[in-house]
Image (cartoon, coloured by chain):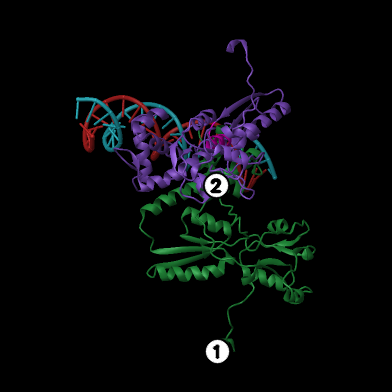
Chain colours: A green, B purple, C cyan, D red
DNA sequence: CGGTCTTACGCCTTTCGTAATAATC
DNA sequence: GATTATTACGAAAGGCGTAAGACCG
């Protein structure tokens, strides 16, 4: 009685894997145990949660899955929170950052190394949600996340756990165009190139890195922003090369476009 | 391993009761079982969570308790959510409302009875948080909550579960004064009686019914709003009588002060 | 002492794995 | 027929209650 988190965890894994046996091996259980877990959940809730062969969540299962992730995350967060109050300050600081938080990251890193000279520092770059979840679960000491924010609504974190957040920097958004794009010259002269002018352009949807297209549609008030394709990745460099090759446009913070790194010839490069 | 919700529930109960044995009888366990629950949690987390005799949470315990409530609530919410997708529409609608949501409640009630003529309707009036928690846990079908809200920030629900919310009505806030209060006449003539003028008045803090004083302090920008006493209750009628008797002032929505009910003499009243 | 929490121990329930059965592709 | 899910059953572990012990006021 009462929705055991263990069972929720197997349900989530089964839903992700789309298979009982795959979930079993990932969790270190036997297929039998996984089957019993799902059966226990279903008998407890009085309704099937998964349709078998293929394994797909029922509507009821979908509802439960919507809750399962946040619950498990919060459970981890609780444990991490307790340990944090007990343990002495860690000897290695683990930082996490989303790719476009690079500029404030440099500042934060300097600050951290100055304030805690003795401690090692580890850095992980990953998607926004992974940063938030990692901080919540205690995997990371500190996380830096970028995102579209207004003055009133600082940043809409999708994580289910409320975290202590502080805005640290802001940057203007620009449209990344290939250099030979017809509008590229216009963008030099006048800053106000409205999104409406680009409604018919081909866009790259890169939700893990840049502004998600849905957010842009809301901002532009236009439904006409069609993605040429979706880029599931966190690498900004690759994304910029795709833009340069004319595969589509992307909205990015200005600082992402400006290379602050100089190239100097070395013996190796000759 | 892994923070069993059962254990969390007993921890919460023990912290509320301030006693193992009291918590045991409330939960239907023996004192021994409760002791084992706490011991299991403490050994799992590797730190004491409660200081005994008297029973008070340690700092680590406080942290865990901050998470425990929301987790347990969300667990209930998940179960209720699943059942809701499976069960056919309930034969009795259970509504809940905070006391000062009375006016929109009347409208909602009429709407509900018109739309679902066959179904019985049950109404519960309780504090804002209880409404939110009840809706999350599926105890209530629909909840109406009042609160101080701006256009940008609709209503800050403290509940840990995000609920589908819709603003349905708004009302101006007024200061409730006794009729013979020196400022009562002024309030008739001009509406703009600033909170600063009343900074030195005696206030009744009724956080479950009216605007909490902390919210007023933030709005007034003044730290000088001192409560004469705190009223822990949900009954508006009693609160208004306290104001009328000169025990203190209260900020309420305007509609709470206007009696729309007429008195007519009956045989019984002679 | 009276009350309250902790520990020890026995019983019962739960849960997992092995293995056999059933069902689907 | 091969893969995958369910069912049956035995062994191990976990959880609860009773009862005795330890601690504090």
Magenta stretch in the rendered image: B126-137
Q: CA distance from mark 2 to mark 1?
A: 53 Å
Q: Nearer the viewer, mark 2 or mark 1?
A: 2
Number of other residues with Cα within 10 Å of mark 1, as a class: few under 14, some 14 to 19, many 20 or more: few
Left/right placement of residue A119 relative to residue B176 reads left
Q: Give the percent coordinates (x, y) of residue B222.
A: 49, 50
- Prevailing secondary structure of the magenta residues: helix
Query: What chain does mark 2 sit on?
Result: A
The residue closer to the viewer here, A209 or B65, is B65
Compared with D7, A216 (above or below) is below
Compared with A186, A7 (above or below) is above
Left/right placement of residue B184 relative to residue B260 reads left
The residue closer to the viewer here, A177 or A24, is A177
Determine which quarter of the picture holds residue B167.
Answer: top right
Left/right placement of residue B60 relative to residue A23 reads left
Q: At 59% across and 78% down in the image, what residue appears?
A: A260
Q: Give the percent coordinates (x, y) of residue A11.
A: 56, 43
Q: Which mark is residue A70?
A: 2
The residue wearing badge 1 is A267
Q: Secondary structure at mark 2?
A: helix
């Amino acid at each position: 009685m009462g929705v055991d988190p263990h069972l929720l965890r197997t349900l989530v894994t089964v839903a992700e894997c789309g298979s009982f046996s795959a979930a079993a091996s990932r969790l270190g259980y036997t297929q039998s145990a996984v089957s019993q877990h799902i059966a226990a959940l279903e008998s407890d809730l009085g309704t099937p949660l998964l349709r078998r062969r293929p394994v797909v969540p029922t509507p009821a299962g979908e509802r439960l899955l919507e809750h399962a992730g946040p619950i498990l995350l919060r459970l981890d967060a609780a444990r991490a929170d307790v340990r944090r109050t007990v343990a002495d300050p860690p000897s290695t600081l683990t930082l996490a950052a989303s790719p476009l938080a690079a500029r404030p990251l440099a500042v934060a890193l300097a600050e951290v190394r100055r304030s805690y000279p003795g401690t090692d520092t580890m850095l992980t770059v990953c998607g926004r949600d992974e940063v938030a979840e990692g901080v919540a679960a205690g995997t990371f000491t500190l996380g830096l996340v970028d995102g579209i924010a207004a003055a009133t609504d600082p940043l809409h974190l999708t994580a289910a756990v409320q975290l202590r957040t502080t805005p640290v920097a802001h940057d203007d958004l620009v449209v990344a165009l290939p250099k030979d794009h017809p509008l590229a010259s216009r963008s030099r002269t006048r800053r106000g190139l409205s999104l409406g002018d680009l409604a018919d352009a081909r866009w790259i949807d890169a939700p893990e890195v840049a502004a998600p297209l849905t957010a842009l549609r809301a901002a532009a008030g236009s439904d006409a922003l069609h993605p040429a394709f979706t880029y599931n990745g966190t690498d900004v460099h690759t994304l910029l090369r795709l833009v340069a090759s004319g595969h589509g446009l992307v909205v990015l913070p200005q600082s992402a476009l400006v290379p602050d790194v100089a190239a100097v010839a070395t013996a190796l490069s000759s």
